[in-house]
Image (cartoon, rainbow, N blue to C red):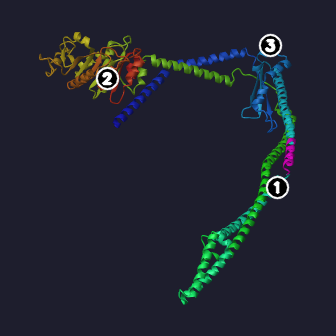
Amino acid sequence: MDSLENELNVQAETRQMQKLQLYQKLVLFTVLKFKWSILAVFLATVIAGICFRYIQFKHSHHKFEGSVTLFYTPRASEEVKPLSINHVLGVFSRQQIFHQLVEEMQLTDKQKSVLKQSIEVKLLRDQHDMFIITGIGESDEYVKQLVNTFVNLGIRNYEEYRTAELRNFLEARERRLGELQAYQKSLIEQLHGLHRQYGIIHPLEEMNNVKKIQGEQNAAKAELNVKLANARHRFAVAEKNYKAVPENVIKHRAKLREFMADMRKFSREYEKAKLMFAERNPRFVEAKTAYEVTQKEFEAFKAKNRITEFDENMLLDIEGVINRHQEAEVALNQMELNMKSLQAEIALVKEKEGKLQHMIPEHESIERLLATTNKNIALLVEELTRVRSNIAHVPNDIILNERVVGTKAFPMLPVKILALIFIAAVFTSGLYTTAVVTYDIVCGKFSGIEEASFHKDFFNTVGVIPHKDAPFSAEQRKILNNEMFYHFILRLKNTRTIFSCSLDGSFLSSVIFDEQFTKAKRNTILVRLISASEAEDRCANMQKIGDFYYSDNGNAGVNFTDKDVQHHIEYLHGFSSGDGKGYGYGYGFAFFPVRSLSVLEPDEISSLYNVVNELKRHYQLVRISREKPFDASCILVRQLHDICDATMLYIGKKQTPRSVLRRVLKLHDEEHKIYAVLTGVTDVNKIISGEYI
């Protein structure tokens, strides 16, 4: 599928290139054909332009010209940029200068009417600081006076314009200077008021001191935080130990200590009595009673003082626990007092820092504005000095390079005018050429032998048929016909089918080679396409074989007058009707009926293709034509061109439209050759010499 698509693309590109080549050659031929008329149009335009210029120059007052060159060297300044050279040219072209020029020179009405055209102000080529003023007039003295007066007026107007511009700028800058000085004074008053409001003169230095003090305070605070943390830790440990002893135990520690001593004493005596005496012994009873009485008194004391949980170990080092708790509490309170004192100092410094933070931005803003204002005032003073210097330099901005000391006569045909005339001639001849070539290609007709030589790549010319009024005798015409047939036979080679296409409005394609084929005893047949409605009348007496009608001479018998030739014809009985007649070797003549003579339908194309293949088995050459001449709208031309091996065109001089010829020539390719016979040719010498081949 891809290879087929590529092949179709290549064929399309090839046809486009062939079409382009065809038009290129046709355009070249048409241009050469009308070369003398094109040259005549060119020369006529040149002559007309020269005549028009002569008449214009004769009635013109522009016969002399003079010029002066001026240098534009303004003093550069950043404040007021110098006028651009184009702006200066605009000042010199102001209407006011021309009014002043009329008043000073007292010009006539005619001179006034052409005054603007008489003066030209333009920039000097390749120069950015020089411009030239050119004057044109009828006489040498008038031109000198005109240019000198115009230059003086232009310089005067420039000085007035530039000086006024600089003075306006100077006044604006002086007003600006006064505004800046008033603003500077207000800023100073704001600065003093700020000092009075906050009571600080140098806020930045004060802020540095505050930062330094805050650094020291932060260090002291960090150290105090460490000590406070240690004191809190010691207090927490002491408090934990202190709280581990019940409050009532601490309160009655002395009495409890006495009870514990008595308890241990009576307990030892009781234990000793149990070991030494019997239970009824008075000593044992006394010891036991003393122990129990002491124990009851102890329990009564605990109940009375609400001592629920008591351990003898609680009394161990109880004084140390109490002392350490008191010492830790005192130390913690002292550290907290120190911290509160430091925090108060930090708050005071922080408050001062806050005041400075509010003051410093405003103070710095005012100082920046004041510094900027001072700088602007200094720059503005320098600027005013430079502007005053520029005002003094204005008279030297424009310097005359030379005065007009002589003039020159204005030529009637300067290079510019000659170039315009030449361009107009080229343009006119180009339009004429385009119009002629377009008309001749679109609406023209084939012009003869010369044009055929430009189409050698698309068709081979095999011969000509002279015009009926050409000075040829019957014998000469016969010789030309025989020579044409000879060239035609030489070019056929392996061609088996040829399509005869008449583009000249005649029916030559049907009969031109009949006699030659007969005399040459060539095995050929002519197949004519006719409409189906005509087939019944014209082919009534002819033998129908398949889809076509066959006859040796168009009726029923052979068309050979030579009896010996008739005996050599062999009839084929495979397609006969049973009466011994058929088509065979020699010269045959057939009709193929179709529904339309402009386009073949698919079944007709298939049928004609089969007929041609069958006839090729019995004839060396099969020729196909139709009795109606072809035009550009016939699709039949392309259909028959594809079916046949070659196409024979009959092209008539001044008879075949180029549009029809181009349509047929587009069918040219390597597989299907195109031959041509030129009809109606009148160039006798070229026909005889054979230059057309």
Q: Which residue is mark 2?
A: 639
C-alpha separation, residue under disc 1 versus residue under disc 3 = 87 Å
The label on residue 52 is: none
Relative to 289, residue 350 above or below:
above
Alpha-carbon neighbours of circle 1 within 10 Å: few (<14), some, or many (≥20)? some
Relative to 573, residue 14 above or below:
below
Is mark 1 in CB contact (under 8 Å) with mark 3? no
Dot 2 or dot 1: first in sequence order is 1
Amino acid type at image mark 3 = Asp
The label on residue 109 is: 3
Does residue 179 belong to the magenta stretch?
A: no
Q: Position of residue 304 (x, y in %)?
A: 64, 70
| Residue nearest the observer in this picture, 142 or 15 | 15
The residue under the point 84% across, 20% down is 100
Dot 1 or dot 3: first in sequence order is 3
Dot 3 or dot 2: first in sequence order is 3
Furthest-top residue in this view: 537
Our reading of the magenta stretch's main secondary structure is helix
Q: Quadrant of residue 522?
A: top left
Relative to 102, residue 286 above or below:
below
Q: How many marks?
A: 3
Span of residues in magenta: 185-199
C-alpha separation, residue under disc 3 versus residue under disc 2 = 81 Å
Judged left or right of residue 91, residue 532 is left
Judged left or right of residue 598, residue 59 is right
Does residue 188 belong to the magenta stretch?
A: yes
Q: Secondary structure at mark 2?
A: helix
Q: Which residue is mark 1?
A: 206
Judged left or right of residue 692, residue 311 is right
